[in-house]
Image (cartoon, helix red, strand yellow):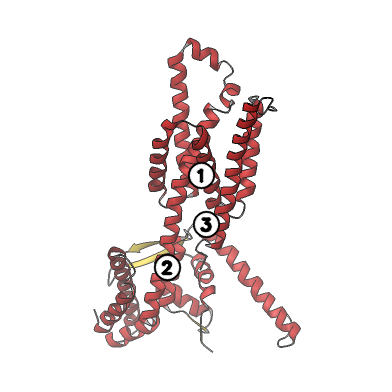
Amino acid sequence: MHHLLKNYLAVVAAHLSPLPKAQRDEELWELREHLLNAVTVNREQGQSEDEAARAALEQFGAPDALGDNIVWAWRRGELIRKRSFWGAAVSTPAVLGYLIYLVAGSGLLNRVWPSFNECYLAHPAYTMAVIHGLFFLCYGLTGMIVGGVFPKQAVKGLCLGLAFFTLVQPLGLDGGLCWLVFALTGAAVGVAFPSRAVRIVCVGLVVVALLWMGRGGLTVPTQPRQFLFRLEETSWWLATILSAWAVSRWRGRHARPGRV
Amino acid sequence: MRRELPKGDLPALILAVLGAGPSHGYAIAREVERLSENALHLREGSLYPALRVLEQDGLIVGAWQPQPKGADRKVYALTEAGAKEAQKRTQELKDYATLIHTMLGRIGHAPSA
């Protein structure tokens, strides 16, 4: 390789110090290939080795500016990957929790399968096998949804989210854990759709309310205990809306790496 | 007058050039200069980081192709999302150019559009 190109690459390499070694080596390798291509094209146009190298370096511009541009592009990519990872990790337990709730807790199953209770009494093993199959579908659907919204680092984020869900699941979906699941759901929506998170959450909660009404769950409380439970449910919903709003505001201040 | 391409316009022009077909970086730069009749100068030092960002956003994909002589060449092509984005950004640039021309016409520095 021409000594001018070597010197150029050495100056660029010095500016790439913020990058991890593997990434730095890859960037320098790619830059070297692009430089050599430029030299080849210049030589094909009749230039000498020296002229071709000088012309190629002139085409690429100052090495410090190029190094800064490469670092900027890498940082932008890292930010996108980190947001995708945490978005996937946060949304996985939330999406999975909601889907399992729809199957097991919302009364949807009773509507779709009216004889569920009788079937469970008569054939418990068969019924539980169907339920477990539905839960398996919930896990698959969660993967599809989370992977579709956060495609980069989706698998790593999903694994962390599933690990969290598996650890807290034995606690059961009540009280504080419900509050956490609802808040995580709001946060996940805030990450994915920062400009309309609150609207999406409100529509989702209306759907949940309709399902509860169908189950006969949304009745006017007549006893103090029912009233307290209704307050607790309201706090879960408020947690969803508040976390969606807070995360979407935070995303607005730390805007997604803009288009170039 | 030969001038440096404004950084903000670069991705739109890259997408527009790739809309005509896959191309490698050097060819993209020379095509921009050819289409502008050498009025615009595109440095590879700005081009390759911009190509990297477009790859991060899923608008283009790059693939290394071995060459019979010399170094491997990375050829870039538009994705489906990139084709849609190319149309959108091209229209934005056209609208912006029309707006500036109209404004200058009203101020009286140029004939109105």
Which comes before the other along the chain, label 2 or label 1? 2
Quadrant where the C terminus of chain B is found in the figure: bottom right
Q: Secondary structure at mark 2?
A: helix
Q: Which residue is mark 3?
A: B81
Q: CA distance from mark 1 to mark 3?
A: 30 Å
Please state which of the two labelled residues, at mark 2 or mark 1, is closer to the viewer.
1
Q: Secondary structure at mark 1?
A: helix
Name the residue: 48% across, 58% down: B79
- Whether pointer 2 and pointer 3 mark residues with C-beta atoms closer than 8 Å, the reply is no
Rendering quarter of residue A105: top right
Callout 3 crowding tier (Cα within 10 Å): few <14, some 14–19, many ≥20: few
Is residue A165 rendered to the left or right of residue B19? Answer: left
Q: Are marks 2 and 1 on the same chain?
A: yes
| Amino acid type at mark 3 | Ala
Q: Secondary structure at mark 3?
A: helix
Tell me if residue B107 can be seen. Answer: yes
Residue A184 is marked as: 1
Q: Which residue is mark 2?
A: A73
| Amino acid type at mark 1 | Leu
The residue sitting at the top extreme is A122
Residue A39: x percent and y percent?
32, 79
| Amino acid type at mark 2 | Ala
